[in-house]
Amino acid sequence: MSIEQLLPRYSNLDRGGMLKRVLTYFADLEDAAQRYKDTRLEREIPDPLHGVIVTGMGGSFIGALFLQDLLYDSWRTPILALREITLPAFADKRHLLVAVSYSGNTEETIRVLVEARRRGIPVVAVTSGGLMAELAEKLSYQLVRLPSGLAPRAAFPYMVTALAAILDALDPSLRLVDSIKRSSLNLAQCGSDMQRHALELADWMLNNYGANRLPIIYAYRPYLSAGYRFKTQINENAKLHAFFSEIPESNHNEIMGWESPSNLFTVVIRAEEPPHMLHRMEFLLDLWSKRGIPYREVKPLGGSRLEKLLSLFFTLDLTSVLLALKRDVDPTPVETISQLKKYLDSRINIRSSLDL
């Protein structure tokens, strides 16, 4: 049965339409490429530019990790993915700050944006509205608008393409937006394969959760963003715990935990592997097999690194939504996050504390 055939079955449960939204992933990428292809930087940019700082939280942050993976060994300008409430000491007017908040009301991101103003750092705001849009207008910052009405995590195609367009404006030789459009068209032809993989993975994970196990998601560069995204999508969509770990770093510490009895299972994101990584992976898989640890390998489709990353994001996003629906959980609401925001709003008046 195809995912499209499952839509009527889950229509009453999936009131926010998250499953349907995920299935528009490649169409959203094409739409985003059309929206942002002519993005130009309207303010003076430092020359030379010492780095691009992309700040955001939650679903508004993942595009920074994605672009770090994509450009890690090919673009010489540093990209710092910042999930903090303050800027690091080295950040100054020789950097560009790109502040991303889908809602426009993320306290941490707004505080970083305001701190950038005090340091004279040029800023581009990426948001659908809210206080950030107001501040961008008041402070004469460039604003890149995102379409409204989406859950922040579902707006990834638009946020990552907007970020790509900003980098293209900094360095036209990158041609990232064109590559995103081309890759989305190519991958759309493989949609049924990715859907099948997502269904199989969701069923396998559901069985392991049912056996009172918890997953560790493993990934290595340049697919760290896909692994981390999968962990957070399981958290937000399926309302389940999941943990993320990086290879090879985890081989120097976390690996020792497998010497004790464990109620864990693992999902490993793998693609092309040079010998130094292949041998590490072979050791881990053999170790888990010997200790009875269930594991599953997830491999991307596509030819280029960009296509591989995009295919992983789609397959794993879809897996997380299917995992929710198979548990009779509506994937869209994030009630505990909403409770935290209400709690903080009652104690922190962000507008009055900005000192503008």
Image: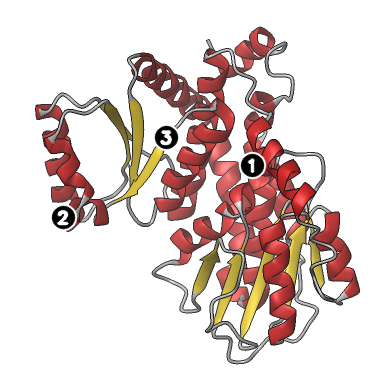
Q: Residue at x 52, y 61 (%)?
A: 67
Q: For mark 3, what is the residue?
A: 242
Q: How is the image coloured?
A: secondary structure
For the point 29% across and 28% down, which residue is it? 265
Mark 1 → mark 3, Cα distance in angstroms = 17 Å
Query: Quick check: marks 1 and 3 in contact, CB under 8 Å?
Result: no
Tell whether 130 sits left or right of 278: right
Q: Earlier in the sequence, mark 1 or mark 3?
A: 1
Helix, strand or loop at mark 3: loop
Residue 224 appears at what percent x and percent y?
Answer: 40, 52
Determine whether, in the image, residue 64 is placed left or right of residue 118. left
- Residue type at the position of mark 3: Ala
User: Which residue is labeled 1 in the image?
Assistant: 153
Give the numbered dot on residue 275: 2
Q: Closest to the observer: 70 or 174?
A: 70
Q: Which residue is most to the left?
A: 290
* Circle 3/circle 2 CB separation < 8 Å: no
Q: Quick one: label 3 or label 2, which is nearer the N terminus?
A: 3
Left or right: 242, with 77 as reference point: left
Q: Nearer the viewer, residue 113 or 296?
A: 113
At x 61% / y 65%, what residue is drawn?
85
Q: Amino acid at mark 2?
A: Pro
Mark 2 neighbour class, 10 Å CA radius: few under 14, some 14 to 19, many 20 or more? few
Q: Quadrant of the C terminus?
A: bottom right
Q: CA distance from mark 3 to mark 2?
A: 29 Å
